[in-house]
Image (cartoon, rainbow, N blue to C red):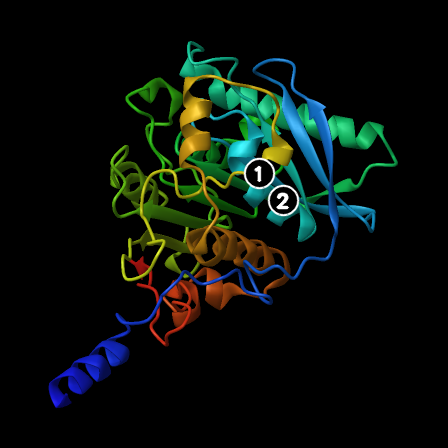
Amino acid sequence: MKQISYLLSFLLITGYALPQTQPLQPTTGYGSSDYRYKSVLKINCEDGPQGFWLYLPDDPHPDSAAVVVFDHGYGAYNPMCYGGWINHLVRRGNIVIFPRYQKNLLDNPSEYTSNAATAIHRAIDTLRAHSSYTQPELDKFFIAGHSFGGVLAANLACDYSEYNIPKPKGILIACPGTGGYDSGRLSSCKKMDSSIKIILIVEHSDNRVDSSLALEIFNTTKSVPSSHKNIIFHFADDRGKPEITSSHSEPTSLDKSFDSGERGFVNKLAVLSAKTDATDYYCYWKLLDALIDCASNGKGCSTAFGDTKEQKFMGIWQGTNIPVKPMEVR
């Protein structure tokens, strides 16, 4: 009996005897469900590769708001693939512009960035043409991108003046890669303005892209000081159910209320793999929220940058005092 008691005590101490489940979305702070707005106004201007969707905070209706351009991954141009994250951003008080940038999988990747820039211009013009819409605060302009969208985010930030779009205050680039279509990327990001804050996120178990492009972007943005430029690695953790994964699709977050009706091979794959879990709350949503607050208001910088505990924290497995494997800043 003593041996059984010792074994149970050991299991309880290590946490493996407990029904560990993933951390829930926090109720306060970055990445949390503490929303200022109850609903999202959805405006569909999707009319081809230079089309876009607009998402505005509502209930209550704000006069103006910061702008986040959200560049999707290759072929994932149905916004529902990222609907959870878009909903989060908008209800926190941001306008989201979602450029389509490609008509289908056969489009020329060298045109993706210019298509996205045109969509941004059109979206801003659409907002300005309707005084009843929430107006864009273009001095609070941010770009987020996943996969090929991460490449576009870097391109747009480097060449914002050439494309005549607002200079972004910050960019978040998740799992960047071209899939071999290198005509869609810049050869170097050495032109990046030193004032632009940069967060790069790499999934440790990503089997579609490796860390090489993220490292290249990090290493060629030499003018950007390390105080506001981090490359962050996110890891899997299988000590609970469902386990924390670390795949290429982690930034996706399915919300069918954002369904554009678009179907296709990549969209179907994205929908199958999209989920909303602790990785969204404590990694992607938290870090972009903190980046926006840091660059706009000087708050949250120790969560966005600096290799701090609050930056790397991934929550606590429910029913235990065991932290989820933290991120690493390299």
Contact, CB < 8 Å: mark 1 with mark 2? yes
The answer to whether residue 20 is left or right of residue 285 is: left
Q: Is residue 79 visible?
A: yes
Q: Residue furthest front?
A: 1
Q: Quadrant of residue 214?
A: top left
Tell me the amino acid under the disc marked 1: Asp
At a point 37% along the width and 76% down the height, the residue shown is: 321
The answer to which of marks 1 and 2 sits earlier in the sequence is 2
Q: Label 1, secondary structure: give it.
A: loop
Residue 1, horizontal then vertical, whole percent = 14, 88
Q: Is residue 223 visible?
A: no
At a point 83% along the width and 27% down the height, the residue shown is: 129
Q: Residue furthest right?
A: 132
Tag nearer the camera, 1 or 2: 1
- CA distance separating discs 1 and 2: 8 Å
Viewport quadrant of the C terminus: bottom left
Residue 183, horizontal then vertical, whole percent = 35, 18
At a point 49% along the width and 31% down the height, the residue shown is: 72
The answer to whether residue 11 is left or right of residue 150 is: left
Residue 85, horizontal then vertical, whole percent = 55, 44
Tell me the amino acid under the disc marked 2: Asn
The answer to whether residue 314 is left or right of residue 47 is: left
Q: Residue furthest top?
A: 106
Q: Which residue is mark 1?
A: 255
Q: Label 2, secondary structure: give it.
A: helix
Circle 2 packing at 10 Å, graded few (<14), some (14-19), many (20+), is many
Residue 150, horizontal then vertical, whole percent = 43, 35
The answer to whether residue 298 is left or right of residue 201 is: right
Q: Which residue is mark 2?
A: 87
